[in-house]
């Protein structure tokens, strides 16, 4: 998402964007941060140690410790440098599996974060509390709770949609007549296109001091994994069959998310163009893997 955010912010008149790579500015080293934050008014924090469910399950200590360390270093340096606003990327994984529905921002600390991504959810919760404490006044802290992002360039190992696209592309290439998917396909997700997510960041950057706090950033539409997979199959004109292995895990069942606060305070309510955005992803991934 960083690339889309950089392009969107750079298109605003009078805005100078500095987007260092992890090699240019290591968030785990305060000396790098002190140099980069001189004369900076607004910081957008999108960096994270994350991945697919298996990665989260196998690396909880690394995920928790490094995400917390990056946020702590960045926030402390930003405060010392006099940064006026920090906009940070949260995650739907902050919510507990048994949180009241629809998911609203006041339920972010209800129960324990979703079990399948526990360390990441806890790290994002701690980051939010840290940011709200450090930048309570006079600076502003905006915490954007993103749902399931997708878009061109996304790591296939970290998300369902690019993984599914490549799975179908390989089946077509190899003339495989059957694709096996984990779970029943009944779990649902709120898929948010990365360019829409970038626009939410822009709106948070441009908003005034009164927008401080957490916001659910979502498409507002829930789709099952099976529905989404069939959409991909139809767009790619795959003629084989899809087999669902119910002995395999499929993650959280999916929950309805309330985006009312973002609509009211950030004027964020993306248009549903799921099929069009899926096609853009398919075109990009197939062009990269021909």
Image (tube, grey):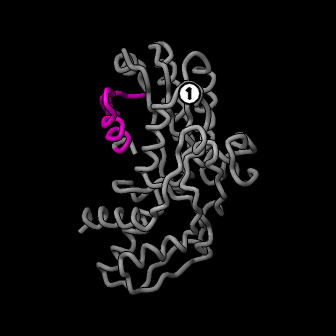
- Does residue 26 sit above or below 109 in this rendering? above
Q: Quadrant of residue 131?
A: top right
Q: Nearer the viewer, residue 38 or 259?
A: 259
Query: Quick one: label 1, few (<14), some, or many (20+) residues within 10 Å?
Result: many
Residue 209 x/y as whole percent: 56, 24
**Residue pointed to by mark 1:** 141
- Does residue 183 sit above or below 191 in this rendering? below
Count all numbered tags in the image, as a single digit.
1
Residue at point 60%, 45% (across, down): 216
Residue at point 40%, 50% (across, down): 195
Q: In the rendered image, which quarter contains the C terminus? A: bottom left
**Under tag 1, what secondary structure?**
strand
Residue at point 62%, 76% (across, down): 246
Q: Which residues are magenta?
A: 4-27
In this rendering, does residue 120 appear at all?
no
Q: Magenta segment, principal secondary structure?
A: loop
Q: Quadrant of residue 139?
A: top right
Residue 203 x/y as whole percent: 47, 37
- Does residue 120 sit above or below 161 in this rendering? above
Tell me if 49 is positioned left or right of 96 in this view: left
Tell me if 285 is positioned left or right of 271 in this view: left
Residue 55 x/y as whole percent: 50, 52
Magenta highlight on residue 14: yes
Residue 148 x/y as whole percent: 52, 54
Magenta highlight on residue 98: no
């Amino acid at each position: 998402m960083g690339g889309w955010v950089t392009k969107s912010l750079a298109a605003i008149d009078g805005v100078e964007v500095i987007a260092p790579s992890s090699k240019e500015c290591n968030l785990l080293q305060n000396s790098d941060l002190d140099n980069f934050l001189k004369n900076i008014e607004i910081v957008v924090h999108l960096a994270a140690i994350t991945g697919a469910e298996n990665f989260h399950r196998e690396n909880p200590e690394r995920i928790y410790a490094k995400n917390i360390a990056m946020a702590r270093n960045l926030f402390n340096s930003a405060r010392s440098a006099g940064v006026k606003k920090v906009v940070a990327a949260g995650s739907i994984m902050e919510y507990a599996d048994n949180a009241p529905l629809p998911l609203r921002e006041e339920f972010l600390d209800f129960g324990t974060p979703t079990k399948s991504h526990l360390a990441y959810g806890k790290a994002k919760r701690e980051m939010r509390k840290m940011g709200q404490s450090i930048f309570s006044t006079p600076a502003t802290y905006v915490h954007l709770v993103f749902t399931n992002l997708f878009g061109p360039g996304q790591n296939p190992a970290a998300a369902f949609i690019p993984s599914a696209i490549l799975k179908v592309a390989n089946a077509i290439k190899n003339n495989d007549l059957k694709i096996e998917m984990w779970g029943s396909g009944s779990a649902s997700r709120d898929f948010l296109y990365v360019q829409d997510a970038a626009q939410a960041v822009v709106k948070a950057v441009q908003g005034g001091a009164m927008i401080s706090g957490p916001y659910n950033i979502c498409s507002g539409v829930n789709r099952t994994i099976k529905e989404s997979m069939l959409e991909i199959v139809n767009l790619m004109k795959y003629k084989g069959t899809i087999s669902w292995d119910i002995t395999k895990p499929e993650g959280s069942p999916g929950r309805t998310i309330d985006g009312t606060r973002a609509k009211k305070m950030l004027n964020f309510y993306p248009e549903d163009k799921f099929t069009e955005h899926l096609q853009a992803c398919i075109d990009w991934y197939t062009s990269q893997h021909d």
